Amino acid sequence: MKNGSRVHYRDQGNNDGLPVVLIHGAMASLHTWEPWVAILGKKYRVITLDLPAHGLTGMVPSADYGGEAFTQTIHAVTQNLGLRQFVIGGNSMGGGATWRYTLAHPKRVLAMVLVDSVPPGNWQRPNEKKSKENKERGAKKSVVGFSLLRQDWFRAIARYFDPKLLIGQGLRAAYNDSPVVDEKLIQRYYDLMMREGTRAAILSRNRSYAGDAAQTPDLSALTQPTLVMWGAQDVVIPVSLMPLFQKILPNTTTVVYEDLGHIPMEEDPERTAIDVMAFLETLQIEPPR
């Protein structure tokens, strides 16, 4: 990049297919998309990347880890690859990076895929009704690490202790206790977070993964076809937000997975990837010549 940053990305799949750019969530990396790459890549060209403060990109010289830096990073990678137009999708924080990028560069985006996406920070979140089922589950586990990162006292001491237990707890909660969360997955998250400079970069980020609440991005301006996907068991970003995306985005298709959590593309790659392919096929977009 022009600011001296080096960005880790992968360009995989069918090189002649429609380009699909996928953006990971907070604390994650491009590895989160590998199950989809294996399926979507048979037909589509799939580009994944590590955002600043994440994965093998990690710490960057500018020390800028906000939403605008993410937009610039996505733009730099796609320009470097010569992509003029493409589909872009993201999970969680990466969903926010997706709609921010599309607001900044609407003519480059053919369609969006939002997977358990953060909303704009100014959105009024609906109150979730606690069902009998939720009560029986006993206040489903939250991702403790995310809650702690919003606390100033924790951020002041977080660089001095080993976060592995928090990482394990957070992954099991976010993945809805999926068997996908094994020691190998936990170790990968841990190793990437503990790379030199990465933990400090994470701690320097804004508290809100949804962005500045004072900003009022108008998502109704995004007329691109959009697939909004959600795991009903998500304990990070509640499925009750999905109707807001459906209401405000003018051209949406939605799908809810009753048995999945915050990372549906890893919890059930085949089922979720099939839904993405069905959505893309309805668009009838010709791959670039």
Image (cartoon, rainbow, N blue to C red):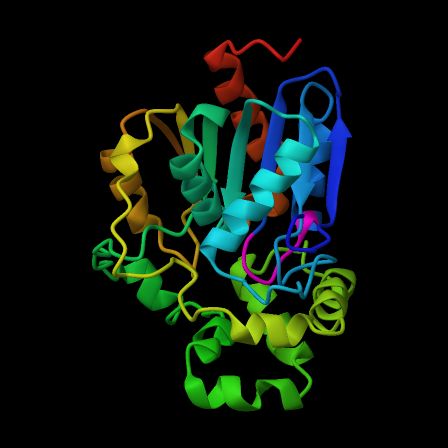
**Residue 26 part of the magenta-drawn span:** yes
Left or right: residue 6 compared with residue 73: right
Residue 257 visible somewhere in the drawing: no
Look at the image and tell me in which quarter the C terminus lies: top right
Residue displayed at 63% across by 13% down: 288
Residue displayed at 25% across by 62% down: 130
Q: Work out whether 23 lies above or below 214.
A: above
At which x and y percent is residue 198? 67, 70
Q: Nearer the viewer, residue 218 or 60?
A: 60
The magenta segment is 25-30
**Residue 41 part of the magenta-drawn span:** no
State the predominant SS element of the stretch in magenta: loop
At which x and y percent is residue 134? 34, 62
Q: Work out whether 81 lies above or below 34.
A: above
At which x and y percent is residue 210? 38, 57
Residue displayed at 44% across by 55% down: 234
Quadrant location of residue 129? bottom left
Q: Work out whether 238 lies above or below 9.
A: below
Q: Nearer the viewer, residue 264 or 106?
A: 106
Residue displayed at 36% across by 55% down: 238
At which x and y percent is residue 173? 53, 65
Residue sitting farthest toward the front: 2
Residue 7 visible somewhere in the drawing: yes
Q: How many marks?
A: 0
Quadrant location of residue 163? bottom right
Q: Work out whether 85 lies above or below 144.
A: above
